[in-house]
Image: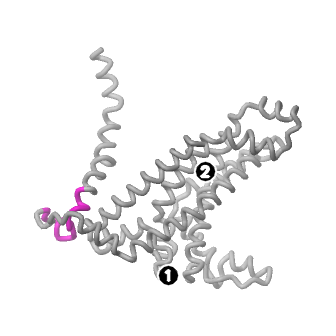
Amino acid sequence: MKANWISVLTFIGPSVVLLMIFLVAPIFISLFMSFTNFNVYAMTDWSRAKFVGFDNFVELFQDELFWKALWNTFYCLIIALPVTVGLALLGAVLLNRETTKFKAFFKTSFFLPFVTNTVAISIVWTWIFNPNYGLLNWFLGLFGIEGPNWLGDPKWAMPSIIILVVWKAVGYNAILFLAGLQNIPSYLYEAAELDGASSVQKFLHITLPMLRPTTVFATTMMIIGYLQLFEEPYMLTGGGPLNSTLSVVLYLYRQGFKFFRLGYASSIAVILFLLIVLLTLVRLRLSKEE
């Protein structure tokens, strides 16, 4: 029995140690720092960091820029989540059809944006969104439509970010839905056909209910991902114009690594962590009720 425990610890020990160092420990350190005024001076001398209680959180809830960043983040989540799910499900259904050709090519093409470096993708999309010689405005010009200044106009900057994050996430989630579709027993569809069910009825009463576990997983991961929006606005707009694309994580980055208000940035991280946990629990609760 003792030898078995030694074998188990030998295999899982390194992973547990790494998780403790790079995941669990930073969470508790960030929580501790959120109650201090930890700044650039305290980085060299921890004794300069003073305990300030809930002052950081009080200031945070009075910070208009934080609420602006929070609104931008939820705006992206509310729009991008259903669009991503709809497009991913549509792509999965099309890929699952027996008449679809070049399935391997389309699977690879769908999945490629997800594994491609976000910095490289953002640079390409910066050129696509360019108002003067970008590909998107050129395409609109073919139909006599004058394209806007996508990344320079506060009205269009966040929709531009949403277009990018949706484009990047659709492929991965389409593959997830495709795996779910392929696990649905074929006899369910055959029985429905014998009962005279239409394609729409089979989709609504067989496909969607059987895809519920996949949908729960995909939507939960998308909620977590979209709430941590950072790389796309950082690379494309830097949070501008007029903070119209400033996300919570980008605001956290500014406070922590630009102004070196690490205690204040940690309070933002704590609030974001609580929001992610809360929305994840709500989503799981709704799935159980369904």
Q: In the image, what residue type sits under mark 2? A: Tyr
Q: Quadrant of residue 43?
A: bottom left
- Judge whether residue 279 is colored magenta: no
> Residue at label 2?
172
Q: In the image, what residue type sits under mark 1? A: Pro
Quarter of the picture containing the C terminus is top right
Q: Which tag, 2 or 1, sits closer to the chain's start? A: 2
Is residue 242 shown left or right of residue 100?
A: left
> Residue at label 1?
241
Q: Give the label, 2 or 1, closer to the camera.
A: 1
Q: Position of residue 156 (x, y in %)?
A: 60, 78
Residue farthest top in this picture: 1
Cα–Cα gap, marks 2 and 1: 30 Å
In front of the other: 277 or 99: 277
Mark drawn on residue 48? none
Residue farthest left in this picture: 47
Residue at 39%, 76% (x, y): give it: 65
Residue at 59%, 69% (x, y): give it: 124
Secondary structure mostly seen in magenta is loop
Stretch of the chain drawn in magenta: 32-46
Judge the density around disc 2: few (<14), some (14-19), many (≥20) Cα neighbours within 10 Å.
many
Q: Quadrant of residue 262?
A: bottom left
Q: Position of residue 102 (x, y in %)?
A: 77, 47
Mark 2 residue element: helix
Is residue 287 shown left or right of residue 209?
A: left
Task: Please tell me whether residue 35 is drawn above or below residue 202 in the rendered image.
Answer: below
Q: Position of residue 264 (x, y in %)?
A: 28, 68
Task: Please tell me whether residue 234 is drawn above or below residue 221 in the rendered image.
Answer: below
Residue at 76%, 44% (x, y): give it: 203
Task: Please tell me whether residue 214 is drawn above or below residue 74 in the rendered image.
Answer: above
